[in-house]
Amino acid sequence: MVSLKCLFTGIILCLTNPLAHAQNIGRKIKINPYHYTIQKDAEGKNGMVVCAHTLAAKVGMDILMQGGNAVDAAIAVQLALAVVYPGAGNLGGGGFMVARFGDGKRIALDFREVAPAGATEDMYVDKKTGEANLQLSQEGHLACGVPGTVAGLFAAMKYAKLPFEKLIRPAIALADKGFVISEREANALNSTADEFRKNNTSLPVFVRQGGWKAGDTLVQKELARTLTRIQRDGAKGFYEGETAKMIVDEMKNSGGIISFADLKNYKFEERVPDEFDYRGYHIITMPLPGSGGVLLHQMLKMLEARPIASYGFHTAKSVQLITEVERRAYADRSEYLGDPDFIKVPVKTLVSDTYLKERMADYDSAHASMSAAIKPGYIKESDQTTHLSIIDKDGNCVSVTTTLNGTYGSKCVVAGAGFLLNNEMDDFSVQPGVPNQYGAVGGEANAIAPHKRMLSSMSPTIVLKDDKPFMVVGTPGGTTIITSVLQSIINVVDFGMNAHDAVNEPKFHHQWLPDQIDVEKDFPADVCRQLQDMGYKINERKPWSHTELIKLKGGTLYEAAADKRGDDDAEGY
Ligand code: GLY
């Protein structure tokens, strides 16, 4: 039974089960995977966890209360999400972690997938027609990049306090004993059933005869065994041995190209976070191959030159300005950004004051600018990626975004190993000018090459004020990730919102191409009409992003908001 409770009620105590073992600060969390309550908002002084699923959020809170730090909690939450949130939580994908520790140190871990050694620039281009076959880059075994998530979790262990063996235990129990699924998960699994059937030689556990309904129990024995191998053998339990053999067999049986060498040679990277100031706040975010760092830096600096707060929240004037800033930044994304280990990206120039001033020189506050007219893109609604924000009692902040790319990734479950593989190859520019599943177009900078990382929009971000943690934020949503994080920051810094409103107010999005402003259904209609009068095309879409935001409320009290758009959950103590 899953119910929704939109009020902060403190830690929820449920029935006993094998997951329950926490005891700290005079409290005990007992996590009941068969009966849980979704909590959208939370407050606390000692630790906050907000992520895409209640059970994973409670696992994180349990780890914090047992004396684990924010990194311990992030590792445990990510592993739990790989079980309870199969659409995006993952072992078979990749991601980014940005952290800022209580002693001031900051890190940016890059565990993005890479193209297999056998990948080629034109691997999705039909030799006869010369056209890109997007079906192949978006679904099935050829769409899979070499997964990075497990390597990323072990890279993060350098900053953890508790043993990995303990952090993975709740995930193993959730997979082995099962958990009840929500209506949203049941619907998502049912609507993907045909794709699961098409892309797997044996029927995966995600397909249920007669369909799923809310309250059914999802048990994942094969996944539990994979997690147990990782618990026993570390990263080798995934990248070598039995699990690697299952992945490679899966590839051989179904036309994929990931090899034993690809898996064994996968390497995470420690990068230098992108950092800059915005109106007295300090932003720490993900650098390339995440495009969020460069784009947030560009957009916030273009906005900083104008008094947006005085334009008002969701007025035609403020929305138009943000739109024009987004248009210019996304145009640069398409031309210049890619894996910095493969191409030279002029980051310093792209974020320089002179360049950004020039970029806005043709901005007209009364009329829409025009994006160059090339093949229009199509943005598919999707919950492909997932984010978790955590802060602990020592002020350690961790912001992690991971992804399978499309919902349930490639739809391919590794036979015998029970986890889904990503379809991240579609985040490359499969052919210059051809939009990917998010409608984003790219060029040579993001072309496919062996071992290269595909450009990402994932933007795990931390905001400091007076050198102290102020906000931890991030979201899924493909190319909308960056504009959602941008709007969360502006909503707080410029429009003075609390965490709940900053996350839940209706959003809008412009990404240069297609040349349109996407708006959520509840976006104010009169603002849309005024924007249309200025020459903008308005495109109404289903809600997007699941933003997970923690913000300093005042003094030493934090507030967390889990996005209303999903089953997301916030916990605090
Ligand atoms: N797959 C979504 C992203 O990395 O941007």
Image (cartoon, grey):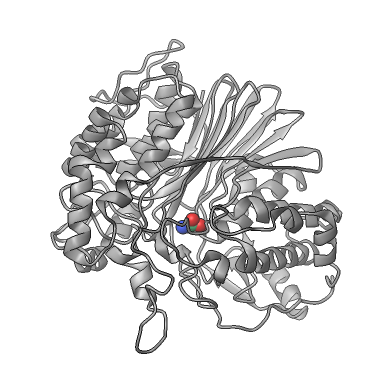
What residue appears at the point 23 percent right and 52 percent down from the top-left corner?
247
Apparent side of residue 370 relative to residue 143 in the rendered image (left or right): right
Tally of numbered discs: 0
Q: Name the quadrant containing residue 398.
A: top right
Most extreme residue toward the top is 26
Q: Position of residue 151 (x, y in %)?
A: 38, 39
Which of the pair 119/386 is nearer the observer? 119
Q: Where is residue 314 in the image (x, y as percent from the top left)?
A: 73, 60
Q: Where is residue 325 in the image (x, y as percent from the top left)?
A: 74, 63
Decide: is 100 above or below 123: above
The quadrant in which the N terminus is found is top left
What residue appears at the point 52 percent right and 55 percent down from the top-left corner?
545
Which of the pair 246/400 is nearer the observer? 246
Apparent side of residue 72 relative to residue 142 in the rendered image (left or right): right
Q: Name the quadrant containing residue 408.
A: bottom left
* Residue 42 visible in this rendered orientation of the protein: yes
Which of the pair 561/365 is nearer the observer? 365
* Residue 496 visible in this rendered orientation of the protein: no
Apparent side of residue 460 relative to residue 88 in the rendered image (left or right): right
Q: Where is residue 297 in the image (x, y as percent from the top left)?
A: 71, 51
What residue appears at the point 74 percent right and 74 percent down from the top-left corner?
531
Decide: is 199 above or below 313: below
